[in-house]
Amino acid sequence: DDSSGASEAYDALVEGDAARVELAYVDSLSSEEQDAYYADATAQYDESEAGLADVPTALQALFAAPYVLGQPVVELIVENGGNEAVDDAFGDPPATSEHLFDPRTYFAGDASIDVDEPGLPDGADEIGETDALGATTLFVMLAERIDPLVALSAADGWGGDVYVAYGLDERTCVRAAFAGDTAADTDEIAQALQAWAAAGPAGAASVVAGAEEVAFESCAAELDGGTTPPATGRSLDALGLPAARAQLMAVAEADGGLDHDEAFAFGDCFVHRVPLDTLTQANESADPPAEVAEAIDTAMIECMRG
C-alpha cells in the first residue's frame, strides 16, 4: 500500500523499534553514562525546539506522530510474541494511522473502509494526488481548534477517508469524505468537524453529515490584512494523549497482565482523568512538581480500580 497512512504506520514501526533498541542500550550504561546521555538528549531537544519555533505546531505534530506512537505499538508486539514477532511485523506492518491510535486494531487486522472520492466543482484544477488524511491528521487538525479529548474520540472512530485538493478562483481548497467504524462513530466525526468549522472563519468550511459518510470541504481563508487565522499551537501537546494511552496500554499488558481491551480501557481512562496541561507538565520533566505527580498517581489508581 503506497498511501500516506501506510507510510506513516510503517515509519512508526521503524522508529518505534529503533527507540526500543536505543533504550535497551541506554539501560546497559553506567549511571554516569546515562546522566551524560540524558543531558545531551535534553540539550539537543532544546536546540531543535528553538529551531522549530517558526514551524506550525500542526506540522511538528504530524512529523512527531510516528516517533511518539510507534514505540508503544512495538512494545505491545514484543509483549505478545517477543523479538521474533517484531521481525514478523516488518512483513505485515501496521497499515493505517488507526493502528497507531488504537493498537487493538492492528492486532485485530482491521482494514480501512473504502470511501468514494469526492468530485470537484466546475472549473477546479486538482492539486496533487488523491489520498487519505487518516486518523492522525484528523486528530491534529481537530485538536488545534476544539477540545483535544473530543478530537481524540473522533479520531478513535475513524474508519476511512479520502480527500482531494483543488484550486479555484485563486483559492486553495480541499474536499474530503469520512466514514466512521460505526454509524455512531460517523456521527461523532461529523459533530467534531462541525465544531471545528464553527471555531474557524465564517464560511471557510462546510460539513454535511450523511448516514454512512461525512462530506467535508474547507478553503484557505484570509482575515483582514491578508493574514491567515492564528493556530492555537495545541496539537503538539495534544499528541501526548494518544501517546500516553498507548504507552500505558503497553505497561498494563506487560506488568498488569491485562488483555488488549482491558489495557486500552486503562490507558483511555487515564488520559480522560488527567488534564492535558498536567500531562504536558509531566512529559516536560523527569521530576515534575508534586501536585502533577499526585494527580497522575491518583488517576492511575482510580483507573486500575476500573
Image (cartoon, rainbow, N blue to C red):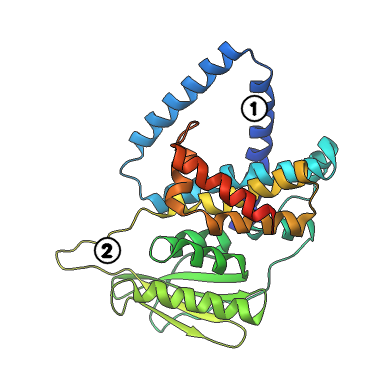
Q: Position of residue 242 (x, y in %)?
A: 57, 54
Q: Is residue 236 visible?
A: no
Which of the 4 quarters of the picture holds residue 186? bottom right
Is 116 or 67 nearer to us in this picture?
Answer: 67
The Cα–Cα distance between marks 1 and 2, rounded to whole angstroms, is 40 Å
The disc labelled 2 sits on which kind of residue?
Answer: Pro
In the rendered image, the vertical position of residue 166 relative to residue 295, given as above or below: below
How far across and down, in percent of the image, does residue 129 sit? Answer: 52, 64
> Residue at left 62%, top 70%?
157
**Residue on which the image places disc 2:** 229
Residue that numbered label 1 is attached to: 22
* Count of numbered marks: 2
Residue at 55% in and 76% down = 188
Mark 1, other Cα within 10 Å: few <14 / some 14–19 / many ≥20: few
Image mark for residue 79: none
Circles 1 and 2, Cβ within 8 Å, touching? The answer is no
Q: Amino acid at mark 1?
A: Glu
**In the figure, 138 relative to 299: above or below?**
below
Q: Residues within 10 Å of mark 2 (few under 14, many from 20)?
A: few
